[in-house]
Amino acid sequence: MFSKKLKTKKQKVPRKFKETKIYEYDIEYASEDLQIFADNFLFSSAFVKIVCNLVIILSLLFIGIGFGILFNQRELKTYKDHCEKTSQCRDSFICQDGLCICSSNQFYNLTSALCTQKKSNLASCNSTDECCCDLKCTNNYCLCPSDKIWYNSDKLCIKRPYYNDSCSSTSDCWLNTNLTCLNSKCICSDANLNFWNGTFCSRVESYLGSCKISSGCNQTQGLVCNLTEQIVYKCVCPSYNYWDLSLKKCITQRNNTQSCTSTDQCRSGTILYCDTSSTNTCICPIDYYWSTNTCVKRISYGKLCSGAFCDTTKLLSCINSYCSCSSNKFWNGTFCVDLITSGINCYNSFTCDSTLGLLCDKTYWQCICPSTHYWTGSECKLKETNGTWCTKTIQCKSDAGLSCISNYCLCQSTYYWSGSQCLPKKTVNTFCTYSYECQTYNGLECIPLLPTGSYCECPTEKFWNTTQCVDKYTLNTPCSYDFECNNILGLLCFGTCRCDYNYFWNGTICVIKNTHGLPCQSDSGCINNLNLVCINNFCSCMPLMYWSTSKCEFKKSINQSCSGLNPACQNYARLSCTSNNICECDTTEYWVQNKCQKPVGINQYCNLTTYRCKANLECQETIENNSICQCPSGSYWTGSTCSPIKTYNQSCDAWNIPCDYTKNFKCLQDGSGTSCLTSYSGFRCTCISTEYLSAGSCGNVTDLKCVCEKTKFWNGSQCVDKKTFGITCNNQCQCISSLICYVTCNCGPNAFYQNSTQTCVQCPPGFTINGLYPYFCYKSSTPDKFVDSKNSCAPGYLARPLTATERSIVSTYTSSEIWVDVYVSSGIYFWGNGISTGISASGSDTLTYNPSSGSFGDVNPSASRNTVCQFG
């Protein structure tokens, strides 16, 4: 007989698809020695062999079945594998939402890898998933949440009972609220010590403890929660009770005359208080009395009364059914006091002693005299009027503005007495009757201004400067209005105080300017708008003008009518009024370049237009490229005319009657009384005596004539210095080299003589010479702004009409205003050459000159004015 022991070994077989744990069992056989207990069995060995073989066959059969089952199980899906139906899941899993999971009353047991029934209340657990019925795994036990309890009959957690809810035991009641299950209700234990505050059971408060409801106060002490009065949300005694500190409870308050130890023991709302100083009873305040369970205020001043209920503490008595003061007292608003004298505080006029004239001032609340009276020290006296003697201002009618000044009741210095009151002194241009009514402290006087009446005005020599009268301005002082200037001196305002246009300043006063022919000291003494200037101490027309019955007019030019008056023609241009009343040149002259021109004589500068030669003379060009008047070829100048040159054997004079040199004729003399100059010996040079030929020399020319030096000329008897600019001449040789002879030694065409260099300067293009004043060139252009006019004058400058002559020249170009060449420094105008114009102005930085009025004006540079340019 033998036996086999079956051993099993559990092995973990991992799956590829899920972390599912499947176990496979290997079977081993343990062969042990077989002992044949033949002694114990009655079977034969053949029987034993048969049995053994059957056992082996059955074992193999069971092993085959096990392997079949195991193989089949390996094809089913386990926990949380994907599935389509429950049959695909193994064991107790169900297919839900595409996964093999446990049913709702089961949980997945990791140990067995199978679904296990969920655990009930108080069962051990590892996670809440193992618990059923809303149970939570708490401290490894399935328990209800803290706000719920387990009902075994219903197998579920239900909400714990709250305050006043039904309960079975105290443990059922809401946790952490101190609730106790009494009489099957969750309530607070001992209502005298605890109360439900809405959240938990709280201890009741004693006197003055905090509360929100009366149940929060110890009701055994009679306390309630004060929700409306001053000590809000505090446990206090109810109305008409007080807290007894020794008894620790509320006691009913005492009534009138009942004993007490403190005022809070007296009935509240009645004004009773405990008189601890004497009676130790509840009584009314002194100004109250007890009536019908309350203290009533004693009757005050002016109220109806009966009996003795007036407030005697205020010395009131019931007089004629009203509470009043006695006759020697008055009511001061608080109590009856003695009547008040002057200066003492009061409350109304009844409080003041009216027998002294006193009344109560409601501003300072003092007994004072009326505003019409003052206090003498013993009584009120009527205040004094204007001009009355006084010692202090209070004695004067202060309400009328009077003050005590120098012991008299008077108005202040800026006021005047109108007869009833002090009024402010009147300002300028205000109607007045007397000067004291005006602001005399500002210089005003009451001045009649017929026919309208009298007004406060400044004296004649002063003006009002908006605050006071000040002296009127004198000559050349800046001003804004005529009234600011001293009109007594005849001054008016033109930016500065000046004389009117028809007046001039004689050093003391403005006097009227004189008309034509009257005496004068300077140009300013003549009426300039008539174009008059002072010449030889008489008012006369400017050099280019003549007097035409009422004013100076420009002299007439060539061929203009002249009414028979020679001065009416431009005599400076050598014009005269002919018998047919026309301005014309003399018959021997011709008109050229704005003047009558005499023909030039022998050896004088000439051209074919401006400087024409006299009859019989020809304008011939010299070797110096100048043209002078000469006799025609074949003739000579006799001193008055051209005469044929002498020929052979005719009488001649080497100087005055020349021979015909073209035929090699010579006029020979014996040389008696003559001598040749040094360095010319050996030649035939016949000269007059050297004492007559002063500074002369023998010219080294082909004809070997005796001539004067270049800076001199022969005057007929000797050599003298050549003539300079402006000196009368007869021929070209008499003038210095840069000048030509035309009546006087002069510059050439369109050139002027520059004194500083003593040379002739050619006028720039566009500029021309004016024959009256040959020291400058001029040109004119249309009106323009100041800067543009100034720029258009380059290389010259704007006109500088400094002298009367220059102003006359300007007048020949225009009679309208022109810009002048000035600049400004500190309000004073200066000419371009630095000379002061003598005109002070303000507001602009440019001046204009008006030829028609002869006056200068201050004009904004953006204005448009005529342009006259000057060069030189």
Image (tube, rainbow, N blue to C red):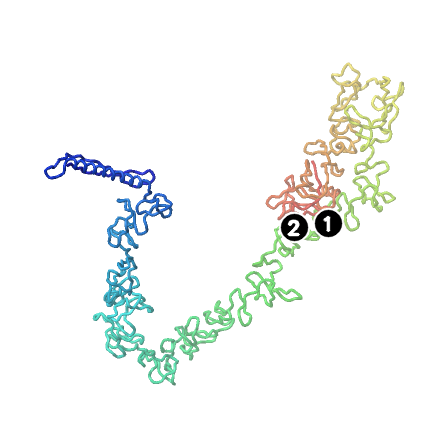
Q: Choose the circle earlier in sequence order: 2 or 1.
A: 2
Q: CA distance from mark 2 to mark 1?
A: 21 Å
Count of all numbered marks drawn on residues in the image? 2
Q: Which residue corresponds to the image point at 27% horizontal and 40% vertical from the top-left?
A: 65
Question: Which quadrant of the figure contains the C terminus?
Answer: top right
Residue 360 lies, in percent from the top left, at 43, 75
Q: Point out the frontmost of discs 2 and 1.
A: 1
The answer to which of 337 and 203 lies nearer the viewer is 203
Where disc 2 sits, the SS reads: loop
Choose top left, top right, bottom left or bottom right for residue 424: bottom right
Q: Is residue 773 left or right of residue 3?
A: right
Amino acid type for the residue under numbered disc 1: Asn
Report the side of 439 relative to 578 (left or right).
Answer: left
Q: Which mark is residue 507?
A: 2
Secondary structure under tag 1 reads helix
Q: In the rendering, at what x and y percent does residue 741 appear?
A: 78, 31
Q: Quadrant of residue 744?
A: top right
Q: Position of residue 435 (x, y in %)?
A: 58, 65
Q: Is residue 597 left or right of residue 452?
A: right
In the rendered image, the quadrant that contains the N terminus is top left
Return the residue nearer the eye: 160 or 25.
25
Give the residue drawn at x 27%, y 71%.
237
Vertically, is 805 above or below 668?
A: below
Q: Based on the displayed image, in which of its 4 quarters is residue 255 positioned? A: bottom left
Q: Residue at horizontal 77%, vertical 29%?
A: 734
Q: Is residue 538 visible?
A: no
Q: Residue at x 12, y 39 (%)?
A: 42
Q: Evaluate if marks 2 and 1 touch, with contact meaning CB atoms under 8 Å apart.
A: no
- Residue on which the image places disc 1: 529
The kind of residue tagged 2 is Gly
What residue occupies the far top of the structure in this picture?
682
Q: Is residue 327 above or below residue 842?
A: below
